[in-house]
Amino acid sequence: MCVAYTVFRLPEQLMGEQLMSGPGSRAPQLSITDPKVCRSYLVGTCPHDLFTNTKQDIGLCPKVHSEPLKIEYEAADAEQKRKWAFEYDYLRDMQKYIDECNRRIDSAQRRLEKTPDEIRQTNALVRHPTCTFSQ
Ligand SMILES: [Zn+2]
């Protein structure tokens, strides 16, 4: 369990306990369809967690990672899951990060492809005075 994730979870847990112990107050449990809930987390792995402490680190997820809702999602039947269609959100989300990774790979490869040219240019500059003198 990474530190960032634990820190992120903490206020949520404290808040939950506080609200639970409040006199006569109903714990405002987020609905599984609430837009504040992170759907990637429910379905699989949130990209924000996936890239923590890597070069691709995209910071903390702005949405709620709710363990009870993840359990609720896992327990739901296929029909219900189809209606929620969280997997589409998940795939769309993941695709976004895969595209981003591919873009980075592309630009890294372009940099590599450029290198022999740069070497030639550098060599040409270094050799040029010699050429001039030998002519
Ligand atoms: Zn998330």
Image: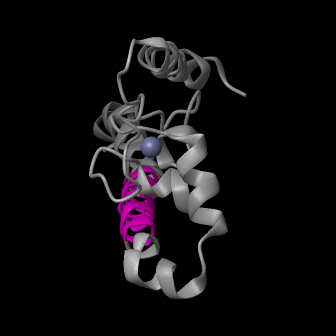
- In terms of image quadrants, where is residue 27? top left
Q: Which residues are magenta?
A: 89-109
- In terms of image quadrants, where is residue 113? bottom left
Q: Is 110 above or below relative to 89?
A: above
Quadrant of the snapshot with the C terminus: top left
Can residue 66 be seen?
yes
Nearer to me, 65 or 46 = 65
Nearer to me, 34 or 6 = 34
Q: Position of residue 35 (x, y in %)?
A: 27, 52
User: Residue at the location (53% across, 56% down)?
Assistant: 42
Q: Is 123 above or below relative to 108?
A: above
User: Residue at the location (53% across, 20% down)?
Assistant: 13
Q: Is 45 above or below relative to 124?
A: below
Nearer to me, 123 or 5 = 5
Model colouring: one colour
Query: Where on the image, by quarter, is ligand 1?
Result: top left
Q: Magenta stretch: residue 101 in it?
A: yes
